[in-house]
């Protein structure tokens, strides 16, 4: 079975927009795990626009509590390993050192990006990534590298040489094509990269803009997919699916 890791960044976005403590990414993580999610993903950035440094520790403690109760739950920490420390943000590797997640997913994002929008250029970045990958693995983490769909065998061999355990295929182009009704080419690019990664001995994750409409086709095309990380769409869908029961709960209070 492909594991589902729920990204709770959007919960932090809502909280930060008001400046208080709610909604809480920890409570959202608890509910997601209780519903059967296999893991929780957070992607802190140096500007702490959503997940903050304290959230990384608090969510990690929640995941650890589930694991202590013999429920295997994975903590996946995403971030740019090249981003330096800034203010209270200590740098990605230091966050991993403090939290010891099961998986560290390395992503080449910057402050100017609203969200991650491309994978690593492994021809240029693999040599710089190698010592950081080694450091993260020494901390006990599985390491996954964010790559574009269509990345070929030569670059994936560079990921292997850098010490990576997995790749995560960036799926936004596939999701956009699926929404337009013509996704065969983009899906084929995902499959091509997934199969080349498998041939290199790498595990295959996927993420970005996956939702209930496009996930099934991706899973059928890549049946050996190890994990998907889903946040934006899942949280948005949850708002709709859970809005009516919440409205009815308020009406019941008012009618009492």
Image: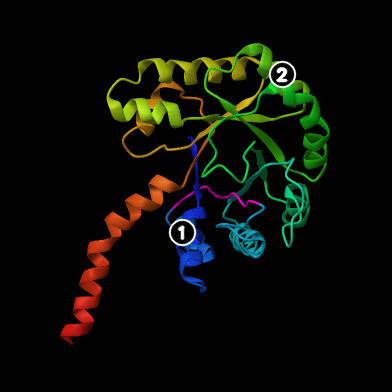
Q: Nearer the viewer, residue 169 or 256?
A: 169
Magenta run includes residue 37 = yes
- Residue numbers of the magenta segment: 36-45
Q: Residue at x 51, y 14 (%)?
A: 192
Considering the whole magenta stretch, tell me its main secondary structure.
Answer: loop
Question: Is residue 8 something one can see in this rendering?
Answer: no
Tell me, for residue 34, which label it has, or none: 1
- As helix, strand or loop, the secondary structure at mark 1 comes to helix
Q: Nearer the viewer, residue 22 or 102?
A: 22
Q: Residue at x 47, y 61 (%)?
A: 28
Q: Is residue 124 left or right of residue 52?
A: right
Question: Is residue 42 something one can see in this rendering?
Answer: yes
Q: Residue at x 51, y 28 (%)?
A: 225
Q: Quadrant of residue 132?
A: top right
Q: Is residue 84 left or right of residue 227?
A: right
Residue ID for mark 2 = 123
Q: Position of residue 247 (x, y in %)?
A: 23, 70
- As helix, strand or loop, the secondary structure at mark 2 comes to helix
Disc 2 crowd, CA 10 A, few/some/many (<14, 14-19, 20+): few
Distance from Cα at disc 2 to Cα at disc 1:
41 Å
Q: Position of residue 164 (x, y in %)?
A: 72, 29
Magenta run includes residue 83 = no
Q: Position of residue 249 (x, y in %)?
A: 24, 74
Q: Position of residue 154 (x, y in %)?
A: 68, 12
């Amino acid at each position: 079975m492909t594991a589902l890791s729920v990204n709770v960044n959007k919960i932090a976005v809502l909280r930060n927009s008001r400046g208080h403590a709610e909604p809480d990414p920890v409570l959202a993580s608890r509910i997601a795990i209780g519903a059967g999610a296999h893991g929780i993903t957070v992607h802190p950035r140096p500007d702490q626009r959503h997940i903050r440094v304290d959230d990384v520790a608090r969510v990690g403690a929640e995941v650890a509590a589930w694991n202590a109760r013999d429920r295997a739950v994975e903590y996946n920490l995403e971030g740019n390993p090249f981003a330096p420390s800034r203010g209270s943000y200590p740098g990605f590797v230091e966050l991993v050192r403090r939290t010891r997640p099961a998986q560290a997913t390395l992503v080449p994002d910057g402050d100017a990006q609203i969200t991650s929008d491309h994978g690593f250029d492994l021809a240029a970045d693999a040599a710089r990534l190698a010592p950081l990958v080694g450091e993260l693995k020494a901390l006990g983490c599985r390491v996954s590298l964010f790559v574009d769909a269509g990345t070929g065998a030569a670059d994936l061999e560079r990921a292997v040489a850098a010490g990576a355990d997995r790749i995560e295929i960036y799926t936004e182009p596939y999701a956009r094509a699926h929404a337009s009704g013509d996704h065969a080419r983009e899906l084929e690019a995902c499959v091509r990269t997934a199969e080349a990664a498998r041939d290199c001995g790498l595990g295959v994750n996927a993420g970005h803009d996956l939702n209930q409409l496009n996930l099934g086709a991706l899973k059928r095309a890549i049946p050996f997919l190890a994990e998907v990380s889903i946040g934006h769409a899942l949280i948005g869908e949850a708002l709709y699916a859970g809005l009516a029961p919440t409205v009815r709960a308020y009406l019941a209070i008012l009618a009492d």
